[in-house]
Amino acid sequence: MTDLTKVKEWLKDADAVIVTAGNGMAKEEGLDILSEENFDDEYGKVADKYDVHTIGDALDKKFDTWDEQWAFWSQLVNEYSFEYEPSETMLALKELLKDKQYFIATSTFGHFFENAGFNEKRIFNAFGDWTRMQCSSGVNHGQKDDREVVKKYLEGKGEVPKCEDCNSPMELHMPLNANFFPDTDAICASVGS
Ligand SMILES: [Zn+2]
């Protein structure tokens, strides 16, 4: 991508823009799941007990109890999503797309684009979104916002959320195991409108 003038022209003329964003964008927004920097300092208990030293490894790990799992997830959601501030890149992207029809397909799961103010109906989170949760039974019992659960954990009053259909513990809406059902609402909504 050397000739940016051309890119600018294309963007100007485009009726609609499709944005794809992966790990690089997540890093830009502060979340580097492969980095060992600061992990042991911030999540010492988890690092010692489970011998994991990156967020990615910790997300892959099945903890001994759901309570531990939610306590840890809540810390992550708080640090990277509740306390999120859009990067310069994100703000620049918003500016670029402000008068455009757009659709965003992303494998970042930190709720960045939603938090930055993009239209939620125009975002497809291919790898889910950790501000949402799903049933851990393996049956698709839908997904729900988990931010109230996270807030309770941060206040020290957390309780493991249970599925309303089958009473199984809920887990993050991410492809951490075979239970993941991608959110197809965004795609249907944008095709339909
Ligand atoms: Zn269920």
Image (cartoon, rainbow, N blue to C red):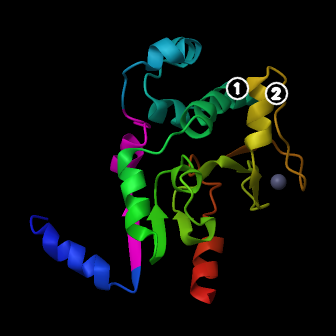
Say which label, 1 or 2, has the lower sequence index. 1
Q: Nearer the viewer, residue 133 or 24?
A: 24
Asked if the beta carbon under badge 1 is closer than 8 A to the nearest atom of ligand 1, the reply is no
Q: Position of residue 191 (x, y in %)?
A: 57, 86
Is 100 situated above or below 47?
below
Asked if the beta carbon under badge 2 is closer than 8 A to the nearest atom of ligand 1, the reply is no
Under mark 1, the amino acid is: Ala
Whether residue 23 is visible to the viewer of this picture, yes or no, is no
Q: Residues within 10 Å of mark 1 (few under 14, many from 20)?
A: some
Question: Magenta stretch?
Answer: 17-34
Ligand 1 image-quadrant field? bottom right
Which secondary structure lies at badge 2? Answer: loop
Q: Which mark is residue 169?
A: none
Q: Residue at x 54, y 19 (%)?
A: 50
| Residue of label 1 | 71
Q: Residue at x 64, y 62 (%)?
A: 181
Q: Residues at badges 1 and 2 in contact (C-beta under 8 Å)?
A: yes
Q: Nearer the viewer, residue 128 or 141?
A: 128
Q: Nearer the viewer, residue 18 or 100?
A: 100
- Residue 39 location, quadrant: top left
Is 120 situated above or below 45?
below
Which secondary structure lies at badge 1? Answer: helix
Q: Residue at x 25, y 80 (%)?
A: 10
Does residue 155 appear to the left or right of 113 in the view shown?
A: right
- Alpha carbon distance from label 1 to label 2: 8 Å
Q: Residues within 10 Å of mark 2 (few under 14, many from 20)?
A: some
| Residue of label 2 | 158
Q: Nearer the viewer, residue 155 or 187?
A: 155
Q: Residue at x 74, y 42 (%)?
A: 147
- Asked if residue 22 lies in the magenta stretch, the reply is yes
Q: Position of residue 108 (x, y in %)?
A: 47, 51
